[in-house]
Image (spheres, rainbow, N blue to C red):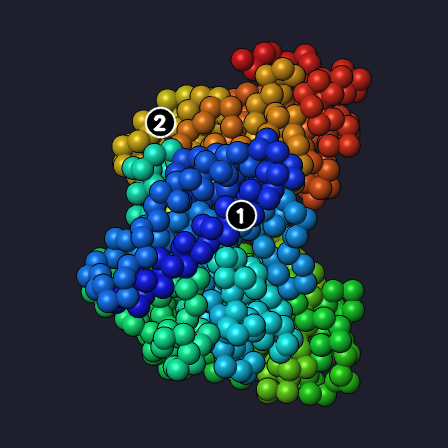
Amino acid sequence: MSRIIARAAIRGAHGYVERAERELREAIEAHGPGKAIGFPNTAYYLPLILALTGIEVKTLADAERALGIARDLLPPVPEDRLWLPYLGPALDAGIATLIAQEIIEALKYLRGEEPEGIWLGFTDDATLRLQGIKLVDGRMPGFAACVGAMPSVEEAVELARALQERNILVFMASNTRGISMAEQLAEAGIEMSWDTFLVPYGKDTSAAVYALNFAARAAMTFGGIKPGDLEAARKILLYNKERVHAFVLALGADYGPEEHDGQLLTDEKYATAAGAINFGFPVIADVPIPQILPRGICTYEHVVSGVPHDKLVPKAIEVRGLKIKVSEIPIPVPYGAGFEGERVRKEQMHVQFGGKYSDAFELLVGRDMSEVEDGRVTVIGPDIDQVEEGGAMPLGVIVEVAGRRFKEDFEPVLERRIHEYVSWANGVFHMGQRTTPWIRISKDAFKKGFRLKHYGEILVHKFKEDFGGIVDKVQVTIITDPEKIAGPMEEAKEIYRKRDERIAGLTDEDVDTFYSCVLCQSYAPNHVCVVTPERLGLCGAYTWLDCAASHEMDPHGPNQPIKKGETIDPVLGQWRGVNEYVKRASNGNLERVNMYSILQDPQTSCGCFECIVAVLPEVNGVMIVNREYLGDTPVGMPFSTMAGQIGGGVQTPGFLGIGKLYITSAKFISAEGGIRRVVWMPRELKEEIRPRLERRLSEIGEPDLIDKIATEDDAVTVEELAAYLEKVKHPVLAMEPLI
């Protein structure tokens, strides 16, 4: 290994440990060793330290203990002439660096120096799980940790767009000579957030540790790896090498060729890079630092340098071994999942459709092969270059598809993808569906030449690209003429009504086949979702019809048919065929699963669930908490703590990860009494599902129950909840004991 890299990394590690020791000593003098320390809204304490050492850092004294391990790991700084042919000392220095950096960043929160402005700081557990579904279903193939800055604002934007177009999550930290890539993007007016795949952690190099404790939590959350010893730490590092496809982009030189003994980057950056390499994350640099090309810790090369800016992203993808498909669509704006969360504000908008501003609808229907002219896009009415800037227009979008294997049941499945496909275009904001879409097209997209024909081109190309197994032809009709949209819109409403009646009547008893969903096995190897007509996947994204369509498109994909076979217990929801599949698909870890029970062999959870159901034996009921809720709950734990206990593909009787739609299903924990058992949920969740909840409670003859379900406004502790339930006479008080 190059002596320049080794000496710099080890020197940097010594510097970080000494800084952490100094700042920690000052904190202990000010607050005492028992002072609490930690990041907000996480069940993993200081996550990276927990993953690598097993230490639960709750106080400054715990941090001191962890820092002692970092000090013990530090190798001596090698002499200038010494050649180190192996990575060992530098890797140890890298681990010491990460421990010190995490303590340094946590102390900032203790001092009240929380991130502000463009900086986001620590990623809480709820966000981690929200992004998890994108990692496991392939929308987000990996992440790039960008350290430093590009030579110019324009080049920073080009790099960000190149990563977004490939759906790669971008973490940004550190700076080059006082300028960070995130600041360059902010100067260009680029929106940065988790929704846009552009995440600015902090301007200090130590903020890069947030990317690595994100990766460590991925292993603990989705991989089900329990931290505690060196073997667990090894598994967490290997998990990241094999499953979390990340890399580091080291951008810009901190010193000139004649400065600092010819060393182009700071010691701190070399030390941080050494820490990342422990995770199997290679470093790709645009400056000519010494390279480390032999394989070993990383899948391929460890450090590749001197890469031209226009080759940075392709080279990083090659070195990390990523397989990425970029959609080549003939439109004049960048396109990729990284643009899905972009907002087009009123002052940025050229035109808008729908919302409260005009009539709009989106419909996808199947046709006979002879009725569809493949690739045709027809615009009926004025295009967006004929509207006053900032104005509104009506919009009707009719997508007609044909395929020899296409079925009517697939129509709503494909129709829901319109939102995703359209919003992946840079400068196009889309939300809603059916008769409630709201679309905005930005001034920038308009100036680049985006028109309604491109809107149609996106849909033609993406439906054929993603659903080629069942779709042979696609044509799109776009209506903006206010006089010609009314009739088609009424026809669309009638189609929606008939669909709802057909789908709403489908029960588990009506079918002999369920479907698996093992998308999350890329992160949780032993987890298996069994998706039925009355129970969708726990992430909330995949229904029985979605899985059926997926299997039609890809017979060898993640959604496989499961023949129910002999009924073992109709109340618990257990079938011989389901048990046999689950045992095989979980690598022998599960013997059986009960689809309708929370107490007996419940379905496993991976970590991507929208909600957690937890039994409250003291009040004979269950509570439901959604991942967006960050407060305390009657079970005595916030969402993040519970999620840390039940994820990773294990059965946890008394706890259940679910999708929100399942709450109002007739099969919701029906073995234990169903929705009558619900005694508490956050106010936000209750209001979100209120219309469906009211319908379901009316169906079972309990219309008043909705007001008897407590929220955080009524109770937070189980004692407060018990008093509230007595006061409102909740029916759970008269039900059979749960346990």
Element on which disc 2 rests = loop
Q: Position of residue 261 (x, y in %)?
A: 36, 75
Up-down relation of residue 287 to residue 249 (above or below)? below
Q: Residues within 10 Å of mark 1 (few under 14, many from 20)?
A: few
Q: Residue at x 25, y 53 (%)?
A: 88
Number of numbered callouts drawn: 2
Q: Which residue is mark 1?
A: 22
Per the rendering, the mark at residue 634 is none
9 to the left or right of 671: left
14 to the left or right of 710: left
Q: Position of residue 195 (x, y in %)?
A: 58, 61
The amino acid marked with disc number 2 is Arg
Q: Quadrant of residue 349?
A: bottom right
Q: Residue at x 64, y 76 (%)?
A: 187
Q: Which residue is mark 2?
A: 592
The amino acid marked with disc number 1 is Arg
